[in-house]
Image: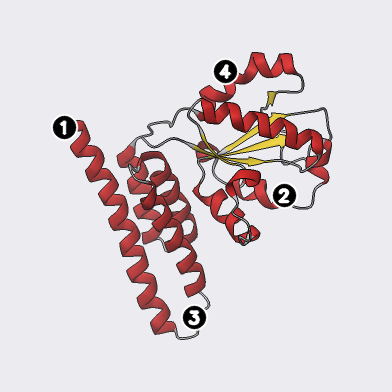
């Protein structure tokens, strides 16, 4: 398995940034790969595009909840897409940095309290346990669900499930990167004015995506038999 990737979603206030910077350092030392914009974004990068790509590619989005976080305009853009995923595939990990008014959509979720140094020290093992493992769901069942979604022409949901599948089981990050690129190409292709050209490109992209999925399964099978 590749190391799980976390997207650290937080407010850019001094207190919040200080906490996230320390959390990033600790998680990195413990072998957890993180997307932390202060470190992960190259100078001059397209901020919006890179953030969107990182959220798609990450296994979990860590939401650092504070008054500043829920006051920030960007916050819903980062966590609502992940929150909309099916409960069994949800990649959202809320951390409570301070007592704050939590949006209605987030209230039902369980969170980990990190509101003091003592609570962080006590609860950090829970954070690591949660994000430091990739659950080995039934591979065949998940593969069949992806195939069924594409057969039902539910391409958007099928691509989300396929990306989750690759994040959990792909041996090489380039597989996840290529599937993310396919997702973006499909979205761009939807704007193609020629229906015939749009259909041809769509078929080729979906076929490539399913071939990548089959390649992941083959790789896992070979590893299990060796």
Left or right? Give the position of 66 relative to 62: right
Nearest the camera: 12 or 105? 12
> Could you tell me residue 65's position as x and y percent?
74, 35
In the image as oriented, which residue stretches furthest toward the front? 43
Front position among marks 2 and 4? 4
Q: Is the C-beta separation of discs 3 and 2 under 8 Å? A: no
The percent coordinates of residue 79 (x first, y second) are: 66, 46
In primary-sequence order, the first of circles 2 and 1 is 2
* Image x and y of residue 182, in percent: 42, 63
Q: Which residue is mark 1?
A: 225
- What's the mark number on residue 125? 4
Q: Quadrant of the C terminus?
A: top left
Identify the mark nearer the N-term, 3 or 2: 2
Look at the numbered disc 4 and give the secondary structure of its residue: helix
Q: Secondary structure at mark 3?
A: loop
Q: Residue at x 46, y 61 (%)?
A: 183
Graded by Cα atoms within 10 Å as few (under 14), some (14 to 19) or many (20 or more), the crowding at tag 2 reads some
**Position of residue 101 measured from the top left corner of the image (x, y, whole percent):** 84, 35
Residue at mark 4 to residue at mark 1: CA–CA distance = 33 Å
**Residue drawn at (76%, 42%) of the image:** 11
20 with respect to 221 (left or right)? right
Give how far apart the Cα atoms at labels 1 and 3 are.
45 Å
Residue 145 sits above or below residue 188 on the image: above
The tag earlier along the polypeptide, 4 or 3, is 4
User: Which of marks 1 and 4 precedes in the sequence?
Assistant: 4
Give the CA distance from mark 2 to mark 1: 45 Å
């Amino acid at each position: 398995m590749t190391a799980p990737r976390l997207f650290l979603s937080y407010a850019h206030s001094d207190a919040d940034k200080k906490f996230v910077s320390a959390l990033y350092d600790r998680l990195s030392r413990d072998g957890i790969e993180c997307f932390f914009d202060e470190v992960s974004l190259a100078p001059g990068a397209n901020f919006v595009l890179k953030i969107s790509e990182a959220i798609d590619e990450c296994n979990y989005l860590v939401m650092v909840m504070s008054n500043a976080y829920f006051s920030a305009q960007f916050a819903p853009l980062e966590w609502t897409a992940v929150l909309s995923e099916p409960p069994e595939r949800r990649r959202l990990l809320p951390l409570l940095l301070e007592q704050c008014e939590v949006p209605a959509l987030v209230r039902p979720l369980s969170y980990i309290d990190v509101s003091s140094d003592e609570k962080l020290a006590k609860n950090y093992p829970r954070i690591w346990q949660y994000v430091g493992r990739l659950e080995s769901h039934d591979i065949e069942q998940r593969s069949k669900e992806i195939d069924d979604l594409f057969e039902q022409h539910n391409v958007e949901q099928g691509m989300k499930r396929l990306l989750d599948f690759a994040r959990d089981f792909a041996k090489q990050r380039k597989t996840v990167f290529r599937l993310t690129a396919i997702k973006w190409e499909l979205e761009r292709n939807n704007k193609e004015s020629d229906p015939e050209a749009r259909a041809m490109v769509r078929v080729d992209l979906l076929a490539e995506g399913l071939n990548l999925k089959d390649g992941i399964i083959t790789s896992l099978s070979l590893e299990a038999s060796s």
